Image (cartoon, rainbow, N blue to C red):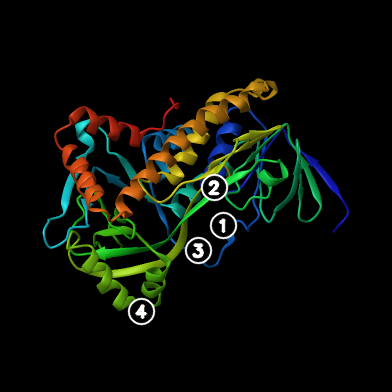
Amino acid sequence: MSHMETSSSELLVIGGGPVGLSLALGLAQRGHGVKLLDAGPDPRQLKTPPPARSTALMPLSLETLTDLGAWPRVAHMSQPLDKLRLIDDQADRWTNPVIEVFSADEITDTPFGSNIINTDLTAALLDLADDTDGLSLHYDSAVESWKPGEVTLADGVVMTGDLIFDCAGRHSPVPAQAGIAIKDHRPNQIALVCKIEHSIDHDNISTEFQRREGPLTTVPLPRSDRDKPRSAIVWVHRPENAEKLGDLDDDAFQKTLQSALRGVLGEITGMRARGGFKVGTQIAETFHGPQLALVGETAHVLPPLGAQGLNSSFADVAVLLSLFDHPSKVADPDMLRRYGAKRRSDVISRLTATHFLNQAIQNDRLGLDHARRGALKSLGWLKPVRHGLMRAGMRPFGVG
């Protein structure tokens, strides 16, 4: 290891994804001095861009990004989500699929959210960072060790900060070094992802097929360069089936996917950005430690259901920016505790709901099948329950 160098900053943010960038920007805009550390290279210098994954951003995330000044720069590159269509796709020869459509205009005059390519959002945040006083970005700066108020990088550089916000994600070494246990649950599922062009317009409708294997979700995207309708696909499978599908060539995979979509998007006319990732959940036993906050996927990992993942992370950012709205708040030891209490309760409620939903969908007992299908049908006429669930999905508890 090289000789030790020391540099100092009031606040350190670890992780340069959309969550870390948003938090660093918001803190700097509120008068804090901020250094952002990221283990990878500057994404603007990459010759080969990363896979073009997208995220459906819910209202709180959009409010946070608008407040930062980022959303107005990229809103035209996003696609509104006006409706959610749920299809209980486990019908047998005796029953038909149960279909329920939820429309945002039932409860609000704005869409459920907007879907955007992650790299487009990151580019807008980086442009803002270049113009923000008090914020500096440090790439190729992997954090190797942590102690209160201090991190040591892989090259031996020591950086200090009054507070450290760890947004590095689920593989960060910091929680373990801070003595914070992580509860990890993996439901033995793989999410296959891709982008498709299709012959029928999506009409700003996101569709989720509830299947025994796991959900199949379509999320609207802006039209392609060829002026064709586009959607993002998240297709969850058990590992053995995911492996078989992953081994198919593009033509065979496309035909299999088209059959699974039951014609809701018409014919698939193009496909790209195939990939996959393991589905799992994680939650830290606490979201804060001495001079430390765990943020985003460092604190919690949610499955790809209902656009919860990145939106829950942006909820962390929103709470932190409301608590640390002035540099004087850094000295208040209660701020981090309040952050952890607010956010962890919401994440636990969402993890619990997701777990029970997964169990209900995957269980093949006849009684549970009927109960699940009956519950979905009942949302068509139980308006207070229906609208309460819709509002809860759009906005985390304890935020705003």
First in sequence, mark 2 or 1: give its number.
Answer: 1
Circles 1 and 4, Cβ within 8 Å, touching? The answer is: no
First in sequence, mark 3 or 4: give its number.
Answer: 3
Estimate the x, y position of residue 286 in percent, counting from the top left.
60, 35
Circles 3 and 4, Cβ within 8 Å, touching? The answer is: no
Spatial CA distance of label 3 from label 2 is: 15 Å
Circles 2 and 1, Cβ within 8 Å, touching? The answer is: yes
| Residue designated by label 4 | 249
Q: What residue is at 74 percent from the left and 44 percent from the top? A: 146
Estimate the x, y position of residue 285 in percent, counting from the top left.
59, 38
Estimate the x, y position of residue 234 in percent, counting from the top left.
35, 58
Spatial CA distance of label 1 from label 4 is: 30 Å
Q: Secondary structure at mark 2?
A: helix
Q: Secondary structure at mark 1?
A: helix
Amino acid at the residue labelled 3: Pro
Amino acid at the residue labelled 4: Asp
Q: Nearer the viewer, mark 3 or mark 4?
A: 4
Circles 1 and 3, Cβ within 8 Å, touching? The answer is: yes
| Residue designated by label 2 | 126
Spatial CA distance of label 3 from label 4 is: 23 Å
| Residue designated by label 3 | 49
First in sequence, mark 4 or 2: give its number.
Answer: 2
Q: Secondary structure at mark 4?
A: loop
Q: Where on the picture, by quarter, is residue 222?
A: bottom left
First in sequence, mark 3 or 2: give its number.
Answer: 3
Q: Which mark is residue 43?
A: 1
Q: Nearer the viewer, mark 4 or mark 2?
A: 4
Q: Does residue 392 lie above or below 5 as drawn? A: above
